[in-house]
Amino acid sequence: MLTKAIRLQSLRYLATPNSGLKPIVGIAAEGESFNSHVHIKALMRGGVMQFFLVVLLVLAPLAVWTNPASAGSSGGVEASVGGVGFMPAAPVMGGSVTITLSLHNTNPTTANNVEYSFYKHSIESGNLLKYAVVDIPGDGYVDVSAVWNSLQEGSQQIWLDVAYNGDTAVRFYKAFNVLGLANLEVTLIEVSPSSGLRIGDSGIVSTTVTNSGTVASGNSTLQVGIQGLTNSSVDVAVPSLTPGQSALVNATLDFPESGTWTLTATPDAYDEVSEVAEGYGSSTLEVEVLPLPDYYFTGQLLITSPSENLDGPWTISGTLARSYGAGNQTAHINFSVATSGQQEAPVIAPLEVMFTGEGDSSQPFSVELDAVLQGLAVGEYALTVTVDPFGWLDQSNNANDQVTGLLNIRPIPNVQVDPASPSSMIVNSGDKVNWYVLLTNTGDISVSGRLNYSWEGQENILSEIINIEPFSSQAWTKNLSTGQGAHTATFSARWQPLTNSYDSDSSDSETTVSITVSDTLSLTFQLSTGSLTTNTATGALAHAPLKYGSTYAYTITLTSSGEGNDTLVCLDGVGAELGQTSVSIANGESAMVTCIFNIEQTTPYSINIVSSSGTAQTHIRTWSISSTDTEFAAEDQSFDRLAAMLGIGAVVFVGILVSAFLLTRKRDEEVERDIYDYCPACEGELEGDEKLCPHCTFNLARARRRFHDCTTCTENIPSMISHCPFCGTEQDLSIHFEKRQRREIKPLPDAVGAQTEAESGPDDDEIVVGTKDFDSTIEEFGYDAGQLESDWDEKFAAAEAEMDALTKRLEAEGEIEEGEDDVAEPLLKTASETFSGEGFEDVIKGRDDMISIDDEGDDSDELSASDAQIRKQLYDITGEEGVLPGEEVIIGMGASEREFVGNEIPDDAMDFSFEDDELTPASIKLKRAARRRKTGEEMGECGACGADIPMDANECDVCGARYD
């Protein structure tokens, strides 16, 4: 069954077979779509003819529903246009109407919750006037109503909607007409004259009244009045006005008071005409009513006279003002002086002041009075100025017609001299006294003059010109020196005015004061003059903190009062005397004291300068001390001076380094002797150049090449020293060297005899066979006897030690403990060991039996394989044994039975590898021959132990020294 539209005008509601009238939005929510496109597509499925049939059926009701029904029933509840009533029956514009609807329940039972709605103009949510529900008894009637306010003029419609029990709602409307009204308004209000109204004036008020309503108005009354003034209203008749018509009416009003007033014009003041809005349409106008002119003085009355003239003239000046003026007007002002007693008041002629223009204005006035006022006695008088003293002007206010000023007849000024005040009543001879004299002017004009004073035999000394302002004081000060010796000094002073100045009483213009002058020495330290310099008083300026170990000079200046002699003593902080300074000084002179001291402490350093005679208070100065010696010049030195000092210091420092190097350098033997005094294995005493310890045969040469890192400062140090040279930490030598027992060496008989002879002491009288004057003889050959003897002793000692070491080494070979590596060392010393610490010239110096070997095929300065032909001669000279050219050499100690050609080394003889097998019986250890380094590798010498190491090595494999 198809849905049927109730209102096709807006298509907002649909009538459905199951639920009655529903809004389209509600149908969409329930899944019943009213989309025409979708609906047409559904109809198209039934065929084209069916589609057009449906369209005709849908559009057919349009002709029926163009006009709404005038009555109807919804669920048995009936409502009709005839049941609609209006109260009032003829409503007017702007008013309200009450609409009543009568509902009839045709059901035998009560109809509960019958819904009804009132709409303005149309059924839309925005036009809803009232919605409610009501219960209607069975077969009964109920009236419901709604109020429509603020009606608009013209035809209006009230729509009604009644629904019950889910049935289709009954909808209809009823039209009614709203009548128009008249509306009176004041559209213009004016007053004449528009300006210049004053108190008591009358003005004409013109008012325009307009009917802005839609119907004609009857006769009415316009009321015009002044707000705030009672009995000021005037009624004016206004004729009947058609819609849009205006009428001009006039009224006369009196303005009894000045000020700004508000005129009001109210149409239909007595509600004679029915209007759209009662009480509206009034208009107002502000009117200013001026008072009568007022003459008054503004500001103060000024009375002045020349500052340097007591006889005038006196100038009287002020300002006279007029408010609310109109036109030109002359005002008179009068002057009067109030006197007392028998004194007559002076007569002063009045003065005229002219005013022009309108409104507010002011005019200054001024008059000079001279001879008229000279008859007045000294004092102050009230001078009064009065405007319009004769009453010729019309004024609104007479209370402000006078102004009063102060007239001063000045007395002749008097200068008073207060007693002179010295800086001290007792002073030393030669000291300066600061004299203070206060001068006071009792008059009202300034005075000028000089102070005539006498002091220490000097009379009538005139000061500079002194100016003293009226009723003020002026101080005069002067430093005057006292004479020598003990005496009484008198100061006297007298005020002496200039010829054009005044002093009415000279009896109070003098002063005389005496002081006592003694002859006592007093010294005062001038703290601002204290200066600290280096070494002497003329040295460079120095500042705290002071440097430890440096010498400073502190200088300060003293000034004296009095004269005499004294001794100033410089003491340090503990009372030790640093020096004395004697001074012989006259009054007012100064002397300098210098204290020189040396800083030998790190705590703050103080000096005390004490007067031995007690003529000065003890002066104390303290400085902080810095223990560092690397501080530079003070902050106030300029950059150029600092740079120069740094340059000089650098040169001096380099010189010091060179001198220190030359003076403190030692030979290697002396350095070793200083460092290695005891054997690290047995604590036996050493001479310093031993290769093996003479007490335990410990290998000192190898021990000296051993280094380790200090556990405290991590610096790499020799393992033989007992304390770290960098941080001073004691080293545990037992960690690095195995302890050994000293062995006692029995001396040979010859040695015992030599020892006994040595103990008995040399015979100083014994003469060595040869020349008696050996020293002078040897000097002829260019040698120093003492040095030569020392060199011989060293050579003999070195040879003996070498032989002893060789013997002990051979004896120690059988005592090598198990677990140590056997190292075969050559019996011959290397060139570096043989000539350690000596140059080639030192070795051959004085040796006349030197043997020279000529190498005919010499190709270089070094020995090589090409020099084999002279090798035998070398062996004959040195006594050594070696391989000569042509000899067969077997390497591998003959352990191999294989035959090989020449000097070729067998593989098994050079194979030193082994397998670690615990079941393999221990084999006898063989001594290893000293390995020769590869000649092709560039070698260097270790700076610590002298061993040969590769040039690119960063650590010595002999002593453990590291290189960066």
Image (tube, rainbow, N blue to C red):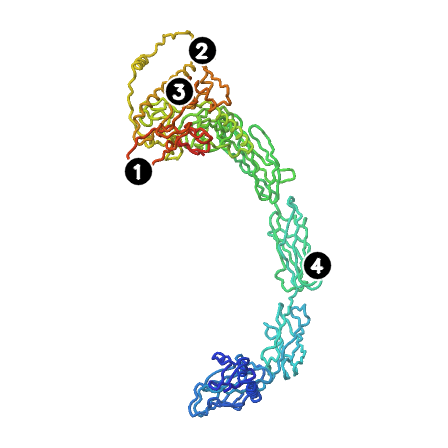
Instruction: Mark yes or no: residue 650 visible.
Output: yes
Q: 878 and 668: which one is in front?
A: 878
Binning the other alpha carbons within 10 Å of mark 3 as few (below 14), some (14 to 19) or many (20 upward) gives few
Q: 140 and 489: which one is in front?
A: 140
Q: Is residue 761 above or below residue 189?
A: above
Q: Quadrant of the C terminus?
A: top left
Q: Earlier in the sequence, mark 3 or mark 2?
A: 2
Report x, y in % for residue 681.
Answer: 32, 27
Mark 1 residue type: Asp
Asked which secondary structure carries label 4, the reply is strand
Q: Which residue is mark 3?
A: 880
Quote the CA–CA distance across marks 1 and 4. 147 Å
Asked which secondary structure carries label 3, the reply is loop
Mark 1 vs mark 2, foreground winner is 1
Quote the CA–CA distance across marks 4 and 3. 152 Å
Mark 3 residue type: Glu
Residue 778 shows which numbered tag?
A: 2
Q: Quadrant of residue 418?
A: top right
Asked which secondary structure carries label 1, the reply is loop
Residue 899 shows which numbered tag?
A: none
Mark 1 vs mark 4, foreground winner is 1
Quote the CA–CA distance across marks 1 and 3. 42 Å
Mark 4 residue type: Met
Q: Which residue is mark 4?
A: 354
Mark 3 vs mark 2, foreground winner is 3
Q: Quadrant of residue 180?
A: bottom right
Instruction: Mark yes or no: residue 89 visible.
Output: no
Asked which secondary structure carries label 2, the reply is helix
Q: Earlier in the sequence, mark 1 or mark 4?
A: 4
Mark 2 residue type: Ile
Q: Earlier in the sequence, mark 2 or mark 4?
A: 4
